[in-house]
Amino acid sequence: MSVPVTIRVQSIDFNIAAEIAALTKHSNDIGAVVSFSGICRAGQGDDAISAMTLEHYPGMVEAEIARHVEQAVSRWPLNGVTVIHRYGRVVPGDNIVLVLTASAHREAAFQAAEFLMDYLKTNAPFWKAEERLGGSTTQTKWVDAQAHDDEATARWKKP
């Protein structure tokens, strides 16, 4: 059996409920769908984000996501996977990423979704610049990788 996989990198928003419906539409053996949606957050105080711009290499990012989806499908008994990642300018409250994993049982769906998000956070070739309001000017800063994200990814490495 081949697992249905959808991977999209797009500038436009997505509808989570519609994506879940599309993933489960032609399957009666799905007992669990886990969804993770990443949303642009503002933060607080003087360090608040007013917007974020995400850039990517078309083609390369889809291939990298597909590589990690293949790993998830080989590690867990999945019945379907959807990964959608936005690029361009987003503001607080906007959707950025959606990961859906479907399986007969919840444990596999949860683990696969967490695995995919950890790898997307550290390995997908996206670059993020945050715009912050600093007094009367807007400051733009490229976001560096975070050690805690690398640590989360490291736990999935096979011994």
Image: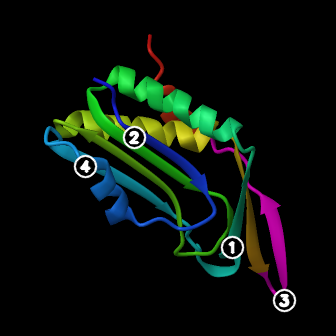
User: In the image, what residue occupies the spot 54% across and 72% down?
Assistant: 94
Q: Which residue is at the far bottom?
A: 136
Give the residue pinned by disc 4. 24
First in residue order: circle 2 vs circle 3:
2
**Which is nearer the eye, 132 or 77?**
77
Mark 1 to mark 4: distance in Å? 33 Å
Res 148 seen here: no
Residues 68 and 137: in front is 68
Which residue is identified by label 3?
A: 136
Question: Gap between marks 4 and 3, in whole Å?
Answer: 48 Å
The residue where tag 1 is placed is: 51
What whole-number distance in Å separates the C-alpha atoms at marks 4 and 2?
Answer: 20 Å
State which tag comes first along the sequence, 2 or 1. Answer: 1
Q: Is residue 26 above or below residue 47?
A: above
- Image-based side of 55 in relation to 36, left or right: right
Residue at 68% across, 73% down: 51
- Residue type (three-letter) at the residue carrying disc 1: Ala
- Residue kind at label 3, given as amino acid type: Ser
Which is nearer the N-term, disc 4 or disc 3? 4
Q: Which residues are magenta?
A: 134-147
Residue tagged 2:
114
Three-letter code for the amino acid on which mark 4 is drawn? Thr
